[in-house]
Amino acid sequence: MKKDEAYDFLCKVAEGLALMFGPNCETIIHEMNGQRIKNLAVYNGHVTGRKAGSTTSIFGKDTALEEETQQNLDFDYQNQMVLGPSGRQIKSSTYHLRGEDYHYALGINFDITVMEQMRGILKHMTNVEGDLLDSIEEKEHTNVEKIFDSCLEMVNRPLEKMKKGERLMLVKLLKEKGVFNLQRSVPYVAERMGVSKYTIYNYLNELENI
């Protein structure tokens, strides 16, 4: 591809990308000379503030005035984050095209400042403290524990020394407090009393027939 053909091709691609992705997308054609660049054509230049004919890099530095550095601009770079001189966050890619008498580079720079701000907002908006079902069960478990302890205090006898009548009395108090309307209350009560859950169901049946 000849020099003029390469330049015309890059201009078509750059203009097309700028039109497709809108005003937040700057496309720019550089003429490369080592670590110095000349911006030959710029579309949506407001993203970085550069104009055609300038020698300014995406960082806002004039490459024609700078001394040689160790930075190597001869490679392709994709989806790199750049903090522009105005504070904008820019997602940047660069692709090189070389010929016998030319070295061009196509820069694609997308201003994602607003998107990054929205990502932060969405992160806070979608943040949750926990699973509602788990939280409900945890609250109910805490309530069962508190009610059980208060009813046990009312019976006023250690669990290991209780006779059947006292166990029935404890289950009756728990029932009156609405404990058995809460989820997983029967297994909890059975474990605290040192009996099977079927025993608790039998106690509840006996209380129904009293």
Image (cartoon, rainbow, N blue to C red):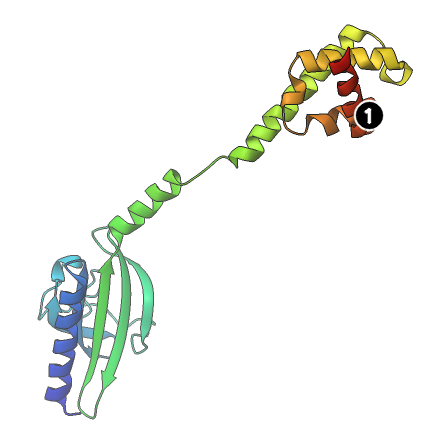
User: What amino acid type is highlighted by mark number 1?
Assistant: Thr
Residue at left offset 56%, top offset 29%: 136
Image coordinates of residue 28 in percent, x first then y, are 16, 70
Seen in the picture, residue 75 relative to 179 is either above or below; the reply is below
Name the quadrant of the N terminus: bottom left
Residue at left offset 80%, top offset 23%: 202
From the viewer's perspective, is 180 left or right of 12? Answer: right
**Residue closest to the far front:** 209
16, 30: nearer the viewer: 16
Image coordinates of residue 141 in percent, x first then y, are 65, 25
From the viewer's perspective, is 106 left or right of 118? Answer: left
Q: Check disc 1 and report the residue beneath it.
A: 199
26, 129: nearer the viewer: 129
Residue at left offset 59%, top offset 25%: 139
Q: Quadrant of residue 2?
A: bottom left
Residue at left offset 21%, top offset 66%: 57
Image coordinates of residue 115 in percent, x first then y, are 28, 51
Image coordinates of residue 193 in percent, x first then y, are 82, 22
